[in-house]
Image (cartoon, rainbow, N blue to C red):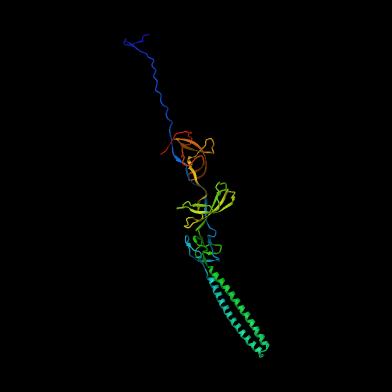
């Protein structure tokens, strides 16, 4: 069969060859799967602590925060301390008007002197009565003095003894009255019952005070009590004798270390908490009465525990309450179910499923299928 001819508009004929050619593209190799880049870390061993975190309030020890009042009523003639001043036990804080007490003391001194003279006179009379009795007794024995003189001398001696005893009683009474006057005069001087720092000055010169009206408040915070609360349903059990680390909101330097001294056996029904009390040395006075502080009580320590970053854990899609870790082996990751334990400072204990030194994805692996190729981020 001859090839067809096409006639152009110019009258020329062109031979057209039609060929049935088929072109095929060369086959391409399949693209390799993408490599995921993740932060990789190793399973480590370290000590982990079980810590109860509480909020507490600083308080002075019993009888170490004292509002100082006088023993008697009176008007203040001097107040000798100011807030912030450190004072010692027995230091003079204030004076009351003592004119009346001074006058009473002068009267009791005079009365004591008078009764003392009376005792001396009674002692002299007693000696004279004894001498008289001795003389009369001798004369009576020689049958010179009559018996009535002997009886009279004996009676005089008995009377002198009674007079001396009465005089001594008067002296004792005068001494007791004087002691009361001295004490009353001493009440005009108000002294601190404890060593500490003057927290507040409540009265000034000219003010009237009495046993119910304090002049100053003195606080000793060398050792303090921390009162805290723990949720009653907390899994962490605090016990007496455990150590607690106390940190105030604005406190610098290392934490102070206290000791748990009491754990209440009674749950507060309103807050569902237990009262926890710690005793803490405060030698530099960092903690102030009424201050709010953070308390961390270490209840147990797991030595050489297997740990991973908390970010390495992902939820198990098949079991929402379970956790998985992505383990890296041979350049690929595999999901490994794990059971966890203590948690501290961003690391969590692994109780089973992993071994020390194994490589795992530190984060970002959630949702990746098993066998995904992974490279470690630099």
In the rendered image, the vertical position of residue 303 relative to residue 21, given as above or below: below
Front residue of this view, candidates 315 and 214: 315
Front residue of this view, candidates 291 and 19: 19
The image quarter containing residue 150 is: bottom right
x and y, in percent, of residue 276 in the image: 55, 52
In the rendered image, the vertical position of residue 351 relative to residue 94, given as above or below: above
Q: How many marks?
A: 0
Front residue of this view, candidates 309 and 206: 309
In the rendered image, the vertical position of residue 228 relative to residue 21, given as above or below: below
Front residue of this view, candidates 66 and 329: 329
x and y, in percent, of residue 101 in the image: 54, 71
Q: Residue furthest bottom?
A: 144
Residue 165 visible in the picture: yes
Image quarter hosting the N terminus = top left
Image quarter hosting the C terminus = top left
x and y, in percent, of residue 52 in the image: 52, 48
x and y, in percent, of residue 85 in the image: 47, 61
In the rendered image, the vertical position of residue 57 relative to residue 6, given as above or below: below
Q: Residue at x 51, y 57 (%)?
A: 223
Residue 92 visible in the picture: no
Q: Residue furthest right?
A: 147
Q: Residue furthest top?
A: 1
Q: Residue at x 60, y 83 (%)?
A: 127
């Amino acid at each position: 069969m001859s090839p067809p001819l096409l006639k152009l508009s110019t009258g020329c004929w062109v031979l057209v060859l039609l060929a049935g050619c088929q072109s095929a593209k060369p086959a391409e190799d399949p693209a390799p799967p993408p490599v995921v880049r993740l932060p990789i870390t190793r399973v480590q061993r370290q000590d982990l602590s079980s810590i109860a975190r509480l909020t507490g309030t600083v308080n002075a020890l019993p009888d170490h925060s004292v509002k100082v009042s006088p023993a008697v009523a009176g008007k203040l003639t001097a107040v000798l301390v100011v807030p912030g001043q450190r004072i010692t036990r027995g230091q003079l804080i204030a004076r009351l008007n003592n004119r009346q007490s001074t006058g009473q003391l002068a009267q009791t001194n005079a009365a004591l002197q008078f009764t003392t003279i009376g005792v001396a006179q009674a002692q002299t009379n007693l000696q004279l009565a004894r001498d008289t009795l001795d003389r009369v007794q001798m004369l009576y024995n020689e049958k010179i003095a009559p018996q009535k003189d002997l009886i009279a001398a004996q009676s005089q001696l008995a009377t002198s003894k009674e007079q001396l005893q009465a005089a001594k009683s008067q002296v004792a009474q005068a001494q007791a009255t004087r002691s009361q006057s001295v004490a009353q005069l001493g009440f005009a001087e108000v002294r601190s019952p404890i060593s500490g720092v003057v927290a507040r000055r409540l009265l000034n010169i000219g003010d009237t005070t009495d046993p119910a009206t304090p002049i100053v408040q003195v606080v000793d915070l060398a050792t303090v009590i921390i009162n805290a609360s723990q949720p009653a349903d907390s899994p962490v059990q605090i016990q007496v004798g455990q150590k607690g680390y106390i940190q105030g909101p604005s406190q610098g330097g290392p934490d102070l270390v206290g000791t748990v001294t009491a754990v209440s056996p009674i749950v507060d029904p309103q807050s569902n908490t237990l009262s926890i009390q710690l005793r803490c040395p405060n030698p530099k006075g960092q903690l102030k009465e009424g201050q709010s502080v953070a308390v961390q009580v270490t209840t147990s320590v797991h030595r050489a525990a297997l740990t991973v970053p908390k970010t390495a854990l992902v939820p198990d899609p098949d079991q929402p309450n379970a956790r998985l870790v992505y383990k890296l082996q041979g350049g690929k990751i595999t999901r490994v179910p794990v059971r966890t334990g203590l948690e501290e400072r961003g690391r969590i204990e692994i109780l089973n499923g992993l071994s020390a030194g194994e490589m795992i994805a530190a984060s970002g692996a959630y949702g990746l299928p098993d066998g995904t190729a992974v490279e470690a981020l630099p």
